[in-house]
Image (spheres, rainbow, N blue to C red):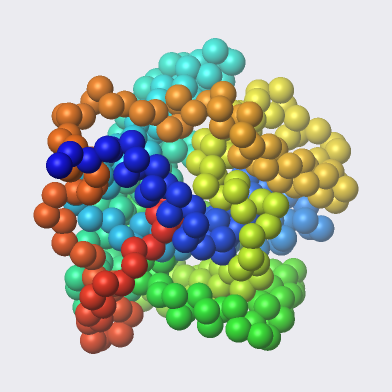
Amino acid sequence: MGYDVRVVKSAEVAESRKDRDPFFDNARFLAVVLVVVGHTVTLFPPNSATHPAVLLLQTFRMPLLIIITGHLAQNFVFNDSKVRGLVTGLALPYLIFEVFYATYAWATGAAAFNLQILLPTYLMWFLMSVIIWRLTVPFWRNVRWPLAIAVALTLISYTHEMPHELTLRRLFALLPFFVLGVCLKREHIKFLKKPGMSAAGVLVLAAGVTFYYTGGRYVPEYWTYWDRGYRWLGVGAFPGVFIHLGVLCLATVLAAAVLSLVPSRRTWFTPFGTKTMYAYLLHGLGIMTVVYFGLHRTEFVQTVPGVLISAIAAAAVATLLCTPPVVRATRCLIEPKAEWLFRRRTQTTAASGHVGARTPTTCSMSPTRTRAAAGRPSRQGES
């Protein structure tokens, strides 16, 4: 008896929406808003009143987004459905926007047309890194001490010069946050949502603000770019390793503090959590336009009110870019169907989504490997 693929797909979509955890949609939306705000305010010339706050945001905004991305990708396996999703959800948008950004830079006179697929333009490094990180998910789920291995790799990577291709420096520098996300379990999230944890999160962020405004030379400014080795940072390998570990811990604690403040219930911005790719990819055009017209050098944005208003405007733009009208207008660029690219699947394969795929195990942050529980429901909302 044949399957009605459309009925099966509709049922799966309905079930996915029903079981979707609003916490992760809320967290992903807020993380992308912070990224857009961060990209905006870092354009402005630093001043003593706002620069420490900008550095604080810079320390944890990308680690926060990457932790969430890793968690939502923890069920990645090599089957037809997941691989096709990787191609249409990340690889094709990467290629499309690489061409788009190169063309935009040429059209505005910012740079000559220079399309190099292996050298991501501006914020496209994130998509390139996520593609590679996601392909490594089965490895992290199956090895012992995945987080320790990831940290060791990033520490070692800082002792060597890295080629610019594939953004290898940032790929290794931020790898521990992705692996941390892969290893997170529901009980870890529940721990962050316990009574009193939100108050603890506020205290941690307040302590962070105090440290960044009073820490002086101890504030890890250049470390938070995540793209420079120990030699460029002016430290030897031995002290650099300990400073590096401290920065990794600092970013993780700040990200956890933000997660403790994320609402677990559905909110007005929960639906936007599934469309954060639109905000991430499209806001770069706005940033390039601001630079083209020189708006980032005006006297107004060098004042405290100017920075605050710019941050609010950036958050509003990020929200706008996740709304249905923008999604409908740009879906062909960011969520291309590209059925022409793949071999035709049988009805049985289309209904099941894979052939002979194994149920993924969940990695453990302890030395003992965790066995996958039989019948465990799959996590919804994978990015």
Total numbered circles: 0
**Which residue shows up at 30% across the image and 68% down it?**
150
Quarter-of-image position of residue 337? top left
Residue 284, percent from left and from top: 57, 34
In the displayed structure, does residue 327 sit left or right of residue 98? right
Residue nearest the observer in this picture, 81 or 119:
81
In the displayed structure, would residue 332 be above or below residue 251? above
In the displayed structure, does residue 106 sit left or right of residue 307? left
**Which residue shows up at 72% across the image and 70% down it?**
209
Residue nearest the observer in this picture, 250 or 14:
14
Residue 38, percent from left and from top: 64, 49
In the displayed structure, would residue 250 be above or below residue 222? below
Q: Quadrant of the N terminus?
A: top left
**Which residue shows up at 17% across the image and 29% down it?**
344
Residue nearest the observer in this picture, 320 or 269:
269
Residue 361 in view here: yes
Q: Residue pushed farthest front?
A: 1
**Which residue shows up at 81% across the image and 58% down it?**
49
Residue nearest the observer in this picture, 381 or 167:
381
In the displayed structure, does residue 64 sit left or right of residue 50? left
Quarter-of-image position of residue 254? bottom right
